[in-house]
Amino acid sequence: MALYKIEDFHPNYRNELFGGEDIKGLNIYTEQDEKVGTVSTALVDEDGRFRYLVMDTGFWIFGKKVLLPVGRFRSDPRSQRIYLKGLSRQQAEQLPEYDEHMTVDYDYEEQVRGVYRTAPLENGVPLERMPTETRTAAVSAPQPSERVRNNIPPAQPVVNPPVSNTTTSTPGFDRLDRDADRDRTPYNRNTYRYEQEPSLYSMNEQDHQTFRLYEEQLVANKDRRKVGEVSVGKRIETETTQVAVPVQQERVVIQHNPTANRGVAVTSGATDFQSGEVMRVDLYEETVDITKQPVVRDEVVIRKEVRQDTVTTEETLRREELDINTAGRPLIDERPLP
């Protein structure tokens, strides 16, 4: 009968089993309101049924972790607490320590069950004070209808082999002695079923019921809607601009210069008098040729910015409250949340 941590067997156990809540971290108290530890985790069997809570005893027993069968506690959903049923501090100290890296096998569970079998339930009689026959019938064997429904064979005491009275410790015989002591119990590792001990593994619905109260909360949703539109375009504007451009013009300058040979005779024939002789000189001037060339004048960047604002609204909310009607004089224990 392999056992698994609840987080390994049900990775999403908070949502699937507890409606988003977590069993880990719940405080564990005695019926006298003495805090004895917290829930470290839970162990389930191969079918996913709860079998144990792992209780971290904290300062109660110096940080020791022990197993708490599901039939030996009750839960109070209103106070978010777990209450022990019939376990004293002395008995808790006798429980074998649990290690999260260990494998919980039949022998270890038998050590745990051995302590709880001697721990009386609330308003009950300790099992060790019952006769062996009564204890075997009351604890081991289910009712006939339950035995047929669950197909559980009746538990039979195991015949014990004779035990030697010698006091000499011989290697190998110590283990036989321990096995013999274990087999004196009315349970057998090959036929044991959790249903054989309802006082340890049967969950009372009245002790574990959940009654939820609901209330309304405001949930603000935001819708994105269009509130306007901005169009950005370009238009052309004209203007007259004057520009001053310096230009050059050529002109003819005729200048008479005096000469030092003035009045000197020249030889006949050196120069022929001719009429109509013309000298031509080309004149130039600069003109202005205006052209237009586009250039970058400015850059425009268009973007949107989000401005944060707070809008206050109000609404009427409803909330459920407990309405307790009693008849007679029942005892009601309302404990505040821890």
Image: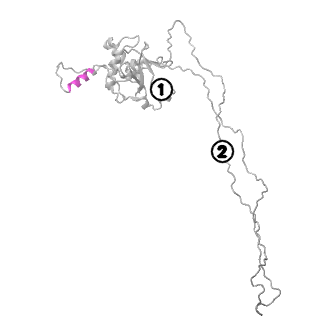
Q: Mark 1 sits on what residue? A: 22
Does any portion of residue 118 appear in the rendered image?
no
Residues packed near mark 1 inside 10 Å, few (<14), some (14 to 19) or many (20 plus):
few
Q: Which residues are magenta?
A: 172-181
Q: Is residue 180 magenta?
A: yes
Q: Is residue 269 above or below residue 293?
A: below
Say what amino acid the circle numbered 2 marks: Arg
**Residue at the right extreme?**
275
Camera-nearest label, 2 or 1: 2
| Mark 2 secondary-structure assignment | loop
Q: Nearer the viewer, residue 200 or 156?
A: 200
Q: Give left or right: position of 163 versus 291.
A: left
Which x, y percent locates residue 334?
A: 51, 13
In the image as oriented, which residue stretches furthest toward the top? 328
The tag earlier along the polypeptide, 2 or 1, is 1
Residue 72: x and y, percent?
Answer: 40, 18
Q: Nearer the viewer, residue 43 or 181?
A: 43
Secondary structure of the residue carrying numbered label 1: loop
Position of the N terminus by quadrant: top left
Q: What residue sits 41% from the left and 12% below the top?
A: 122
* Residue found 37% across the figure and 20% down from its top: 196
Res 273 → quadrant:
bottom right
The three-letter amino acid code for the residue at tag 1 is Asp
Check residue 220 for magenta coloring. no
The x and y percentages for residue 114 are 32, 19
At x 74% / y 61%, what residue is drawn?
292
Estimate how packed mark 2 is, as few (under 14), some (14 to 19) or many (20 or more) residues with alpha carbons within 10 Å.
Answer: few
265 lies above or below 336: below
Mark 2 lies on residue? 303
